[in-house]
Image (cartoon, grey):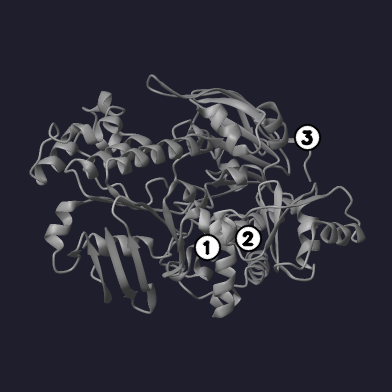
Amino acid sequence: MITTEPVITVKNMVKKFGNFVANDNLNFEVYKGEIFGFIGANGAGKTTAIRILCGLSTPTSGEMKVGGFDIYRQTEKIKQNIGYMSQKFSLYEDLTINENIRFYGGIYGMKIADRKVRTEKMLERLELTEYRNRKIGDLPLGWKQKLAFSIAILHNPKIVFLDEPTGGVDPITRRQFWNLIYEAVEQGITVFVTTHYMDEAEYCDRVSIMAEGRIVALDTPERLKKQYSANNMDEVFLKIAR
Amino acid sequence: MIEVKDLHKQYGDIVALDKVSLTVGRGELFGLIGPDGAGKTSLMRILMSLLLPDGGTATMNELDVVKDYKEVRLITGYMPGRFSLYPDLTVEENLKFFATVFGTTIQENYYLIKDIYQQIEPFKNRRAGKLSGGMKQKLALSCALIHKPEILILDEPTTGVDAVSRKEFWEMLKRLKSMGITILVSTPYMDEASMCDRIALIQQGRLMSVATPHEMIESFPEDLWAVHTRKIYETSKHLEKLSSTLSVNSFGQVLHLVTSKGVHSAESIQKYLLEKGELEITIEPSSATIEDVFILLMNHHKHLK
């Protein structure tokens, strides 16, 4: 359910590295329960912005709130209330599925009984119950990515940040992954996602497009396509970024 | 040209390449398309003599990749999937290093890399490790080309690269092809297939299909419908239950419905959805994309197992 209640508020966000301006005065809101797509060319400043919103990096200036918490003073609170996964970092390869779940559950301070109930439900949903003692390193990439996402939302965070979650995944698994995203949204989790697949940009409720440190467009895919007289988001992106 | 016959590679119980046979013609731009773990890198590493096959043979311009590996390395340029230039050397030092190793100079073959290298030349005194992703990619391609190879092997050069830079990279490959270089390139992005002369779809160590992108799309054996709806999720649930439905997948805001050949018409599907209470829907026959072909073949192979 999309609301107009902001769960992320970003006002005049600036991040500089020396003379280089990575984020040049960003302003946007992400609403509770929406899938917010964060698109842009390599080096446009997406990762910098995500790191700040996750409480891993301090902005140079601006006012930002994530899940109601202040980005300067309450980074620990923010970390407890978000989930994160990326293509590059997800789970510990040398640990089993079970061990990874216990590890993440512990980090997020989940109650043991709660963790157990949620774990059973999740493994059943992914049809992985019988593989729970397998090492992550032995699993196919598609399983790993679906599992990593499910573990990232096991503690029922307010927001989950997904940084190119489907890179290199086969086309069937890629769509199964998006079904998991929709299910998370049904549970009331807000999804903040980056991708290089432009068809996936169409699955977002709203999409922001970054170029050279700025947000150059932000709207629903439908309105963006109309505005740029494009047939699909790929054309929109090419028109804006080229 | 590249000739691969019954190539087999296994890591413990895992079969990385399952009797793969393939011919890439001289001067062809050939795409190896499949997800991570399909066997693309294993195949390329065997061709580059960085990995020994467990069975089968492969030749590059008539040279055997096992017996004649020294000669093979002289006539091929290789860009591995992971950035593997020297991060502590500058852009120019890296290029000079590769030229020297192959007994040539930057000047001698500059014409080959000019278009690409000019874009990073302003940063020639920067350490390679400090370059952005796109610039690293251009430097790696320059280094793979500086000895004027006859064959170029590129392992996922566009992975993680944005849509605009990806298009530019393919334009560079087309220019190299026009200079007579044979190119074998792998990618997980299905939409890049149309840039190749011919493609192979690879999944779990097997080539599912080899053809030109056009042939692959034309020979799609079933009926494919583009369904426009406001309620993607609900409509797809209904369509999955339609008789003779083979698959329903979302492609952006459109659903692709695949049904057995000759069973349905747009009207009969429309009627079915009307009965389910879906009113605002348009259905039209549509041609397949490479991703549709890939999904169909993947499902087909699953059923065979």
Q: Which SS class for mark 2? A: helix
Residue shown at 20% from the left, 38% from the top: B88
Looking at the rendered structure, the kind of residue marked 3 is: Thr
| Callout 2–callout 3 Cβ contact below 8 Å | no
Q: Which SS class for mark 1? A: helix
Which label was assigned to residue A176? 2
CA gap, disc 1 and disc 2 = 9 Å
Asked if badge 1 and badge 3 are on a common chain, one would say: yes
The reply, left or right, for residue B206 in relation to residue B128 is right
Residue A10 visible in image: no
Foreground mark, 2 or 3, reads 2
The reply, left or right, for residue A97 in relation to residue B90 is right
Q: Earlier in the sequence, mark 2 or mark 3?
A: 3
For the residue pair B171 and A220, the one nearer the viewer reads as B171
The reply, left or right, for residue B83 in relation to residue A140 is left
Asked if badge 2 and badge 3 are on a common chain, one would say: yes
Tell me the subunit letter for badge 1. A
CA gap, disc 2 and disc 3 = 28 Å
Q: Which residue is the site of mark 1? A: A142
Residue shown at 35% from the left, 70% from the top: B21
Foreground mark, 1 or 3, reads 1
Local crowd at mark 3 within 10 Å, few (<14), some, or many (≥20)?
few
Q: Earlier in the sequence, mark 1 or mark 3?
A: 3
Classify B126 as above or below A128.
Answer: above
Query: Residue A158 at what x, y percent from top left?
Result: 67, 46
For the residue pair B44 and A24, the one nearer the viewer reads as B44
Q: Which SS class for mark 3? A: loop
